[in-house]
Image (tube, rainbow, N blue to C red):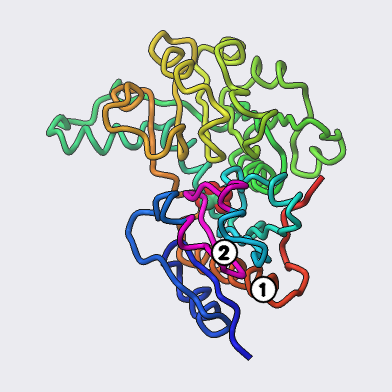
Amino acid sequence: MSKPRVFVTRIMPAAGLDRVREACNAEIWSGEMPPPYETLREKVRGVDGLLCMLTDRIDGQLMDAAGPGLKVISQMAVGYDNIDVPAAQVRGIPIGHTPGVLTEATADLAFGLLLAAARRIVEGANYIQDGQWRTWDPNALLGRDLSGATLGIIGLGRIGRAVARRAAGFNMRILAYSPSLTFESAAEVNAVAVDLETLLRESDFVSLHLPLNARTRHLINRVTLSQMKANAILVNTARGGIIDHAALVEALRSGIIGGAALDVTDPEPISPDDPLLSLPNALVVPHIGSASQWTRDQMARMAAENLIAGVTGQPLPNRVPTG
Ligand code: DGY
């Protein structure tokens, strides 16, 4: 019997790619950059399965270009805002993703960004590289203490909870907001459930852990930024689109908030000329929340398992919830 035909949009870790190659007749895009949309439409023609990345736009037209044989879309990421889920649903195509395995790595990075911004670690490294360090200085590079400060976590799901566990270890007071968060569920990670406005008003640090969708797009905007403390630091390891980028630049410039530490931006990649990058109170890294070897191996393995299950008519081990 011939193997199912699949297209994989990037060279992913061998932990997953080898499985795909064994089980499928796979074409793998070997470019350093993602396949352009039009090329992807050509490549998926007649495939049984598509394994894609968050850098690929997967819409109804692309699904139609693949044709009626497309049995599964498997994304190597937990987030799937690049995929038109309703379009897949009406076509009966299940979508796979990789929840769970990137929780700790992403929480580590969120906390790393928080610490780096609070204690001005990158500024300190640059200070030495620029040849400015002449003596220990009682007044130089003074930052903010974490112990006793309040952390507001917006989105207390898997990653938000992992961030809360880290914050408890640093003796922080933790507030949390999610639309259906209960007091008991927040208390499990030493957090107090509050409404969004209270969280923004009382937090010294605010960390975002929400999916990007129509409800969360630009949740952080001119109005919500103005509700934050004037020295608050905003951390985003979720999706860039949750923040209104222009409003953030303005808030950082005019001192409406104290700083931002971002793993994600809108758009990605951020242009090297973007005004955000010239602000001394903004720290930006290139979407590396899940970028540890173990984590990426697990993501690739899960994406391969979802793909193989889909093309062989089995239920996906990790299917994106619908409806
Ligand atoms: C995801 O899986 O959605 C992450 O953003 C990848 O780092």
Q: Residue at x 64, y 47 (%)?
A: 159
Task: Examine the rendered structure and indicate whether residue 189 appears above or below residue 93.
Answer: above
**Which residues lie in the magenta part?**
41-62
Position of the N terminus, as image quadrant, is: bottom right
User: Which residue is nearer to you in this view: 10 or 4?
Assistant: 4
Left or right for 255, reference 179: left
Q: Residues within 10 Å of mark 2 (few under 14, many from 20)?
A: many
Q: Which residue is mark 1?
A: 311
Dividing the picture into quarters, in which one does residue 10 lie? bottom left
Q: Is residue 66 visible?
A: yes
- Quadrant where the C terminus lies? top right
**Left or right for 152, reference 29:** right
Q: Is residue 118 above or below residue 315?
A: above
The residue at the point 41 percent across, 18 percent down is 249
Q: Give the image location of residue 48, x and y in percent.
A: 61, 70
> Dot 1 surroundings within 10 Å: few (below 14), some, or many (20 or more)?
many
- Of labels 1 and 2, earlier in sequence is 2
Q: x and y percent of residue 289 in the render?
A: 49, 49
Residue 179 in picture, x, y percent from top left? 79, 30
Regarding residue 106, the answer to whether it shows in the image is no
Residue under numbered circle 2: 50
Amino acid, disc 2 = Leu
Q: Would you place residue 238 above or below residue 142 in this image? A: below
- Numbered circle sitting on residue 120: none
The answer to if 118 sits in the magenta stretch is no
The residue sitting at 73% across, 29% down in the picture is: 177
> Secondary structure under badge 2?
strand
* Kind of residue at badge 1: Val
Residue 24: image location, x then y, percent: 56, 80
Q: Does the residue tagged 1 have its C-beta within 8 Å of any atom of ligand 1?
A: no
Q: Is 56 contained in the magenta span?
A: yes
C-alpha gap between disc 1 and disc 2: 9 Å
